[in-house]
Image (spheres, rainbow, N blue to C red):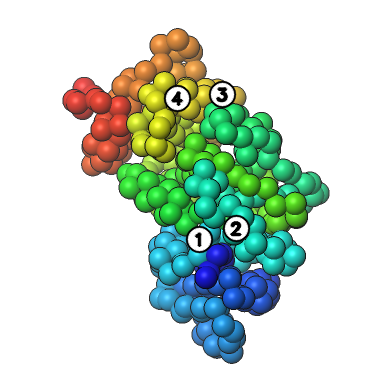
């Protein structure tokens, strides 16, 4: 029985990536399968991968494609009870990987456990530190969410083995959104935490290298790449945390996250999420990157930062869509048509 599927979508072709791939392949065992899906198109890398042979180690050579597609196609091949989605530029620890199948066997029949975490090292040019999330094993989903938010500003709970059906459900929710944006990792974590609790493995599990995400300036440049790839104007970057607050709260309020949640519970998730991300919106300065619509974005930001006590999903969605319509009425319509179903808004906002 395959307990754990380790999935590494890979695009890099340097020696470090090859070393990470080789290490991952070494974890293949009777209860652990390893799936490497390479979309680099690099001939030398393909030749290297062709030399690796091991039972339960699956090496897939794919045509060049986007990162989301590469990860999704790899996930479709997974057979394990839990899936550990890892990067080809980070580090996992051999002893933790060896112990995971037994830990999964302990919790496999408890559907309230949707993930397993351990100690995680966050590495940057300024140094390294270790984090362990508080209260994510609590029965109360709101307590889990609060514990996650208060543990570290770096969202590394994503680097955890997750129950396969929960991971697929979460991926489908995110793929259905009108635009895949860089704050989706935050929403992903929220969906995990309201869906179920995490068991703890008393091991150092993962080392995450922050790379381009370790400073506000470099992180915003990465955010900008997502907005550009989605065909959105760079000035949308100024609304980044408002969008994250709105989208996450709308999902938490309206999705059937797990059996037995009452409307009041879902509302408490939504309220907490919105307040958490709205605080980021209030304090984080965001660049407009030379957009001719940056001033209009600033005006909209100023409006909402001073709108305490007057925040409604309907008004926020109307303003977001009107802003998107400045550069693309089609994008505005697409955004409105999707999100109005979550908040019960029937008519498009007036121009």
- Is the residue 322 above or below the residue 72 in the image? above
Residue under numbered circle 4: 265
Q: Residues within 10 Å of mark 2 (few under 14, many from 20)?
A: many
**N-term mark: 1 or 2:** 1
| Residue 119 in the figure: left or right of residue 139 | right
The residues bearing labels 1 and 4 have C-alpha atoms spaced at a distance of 28 Å
Say if 53 sits above or below 316 in the image: below
In the rendered view, does 26 fall on the left or right side of 345?
right
Evaluate whether residue 211 shows in this view.
yes
Question: What secondary structure is marked by label 1?
Answer: loop
Q: Badges 1 and 2: C-beta atoms under 8 Å apart? A: yes
Query: Quick one: label 3 or label 4, which is nearer the N terminus?
Result: 4
Circle 4 Cα neighbour tier, 10 Å, few/some/many (<14 / 14–19 / ≥20): some
> Considering depth in this image, is 172 or 107 the residue closer to the camera?
107
Tell me what residue is drawn at x 63 percent, y 47 percent.
Answer: 199
Q: Examine the rendered structure and indicate whether residue 349 appears above or below residue 32.
A: above
Marks 4 and 2, how far apart in space? 29 Å
User: What residue is at 49 percent from the left and 72 percent from the top?
Assistant: 37
Residue at x-position 41% and y-position 11%: 310
Residue bearing the label numbered 2: 104
Q: Which residue is mark 3?
A: 279
Q: CA distance from mark 2 to mark 3?
A: 37 Å
Number of numbered callouts drawn: 4
| Label 2 SS | helix
Find residue 81 and name its label.
1
Check residue 158 in the rendering and tell me which mark sits there, or answer none: none
Dot 3: few (<14), some (14–19), or many (≥20) neighbours within 10 Å? some
């Amino acid at each position: 029985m395959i307990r754990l599927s380790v999935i590494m979508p890979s695009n890099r072709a340097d020696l470090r990536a090859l070393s990470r791939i080789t290490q991952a392949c070494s974890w293949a065992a009777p209860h652990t399968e390893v799936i490497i899906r390479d979309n680099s198109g690099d001939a030398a890398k393909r030749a290297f991968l062709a030399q690796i042979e091991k039972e339960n180690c699956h090496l897939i050579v794919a045509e060049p494609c986007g990162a989301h597609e590469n990860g999704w196609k790899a996930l479709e091949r997974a057979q394990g009870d839990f899936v550990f989605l890892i990067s080809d530029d980070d580090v996992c620890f051999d002893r933790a990987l060896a112990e995971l199948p037994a830990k999964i066997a302990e919790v496999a029949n408890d559907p309230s456990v949707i993930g397993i975490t351990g100690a995680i090292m966050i590495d940057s040019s300024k140094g390294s530190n270790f984090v362990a999330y508080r209260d994510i094993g609590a029965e109360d989903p709101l307590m889990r969410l609060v514990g996650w938010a208060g543990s570290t500003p770096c969202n590394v709970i994503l680097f955890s083995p997750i129950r396969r059906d929960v991971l697929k459900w979460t991926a489908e929710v995110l793929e259905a959104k009108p635009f895949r944006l860089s704050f989706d990792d935050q929403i992903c974590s929220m969906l995990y935490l309201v869906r179920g609790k995490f068991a703890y493995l008393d091991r150092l599990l993962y080392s995450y290298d922050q790379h381009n995400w370790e400073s506000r300036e470099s992180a915003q440049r990465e955010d900008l790449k997502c907005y550009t790839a989605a065909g959105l104007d760079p000035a949308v970057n100024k609304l980044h945390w408002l969008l994250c607050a709105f989208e996450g709260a709308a999902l938490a309020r309206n999705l059937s996250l797990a059996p037995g949640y009452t409307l009041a519970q879902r509302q408490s998730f939504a309220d907490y999420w919105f307040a958490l991300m709205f605080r980021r919106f209030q304090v984080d300065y965001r660049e407009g990157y030379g957009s001719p619509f940056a001033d209009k974005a600033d005006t909209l930001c100023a409006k909402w930062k001073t709108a305490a006590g007057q925040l409604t999903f309907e008004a926020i969605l109307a303003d977001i869509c009107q802003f998107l319509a400045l550069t693309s009425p089609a994008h505005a319509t697409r955004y409105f048509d999707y999100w109005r179903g979550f908040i019960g808004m029937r008519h498009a906002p007036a121009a």
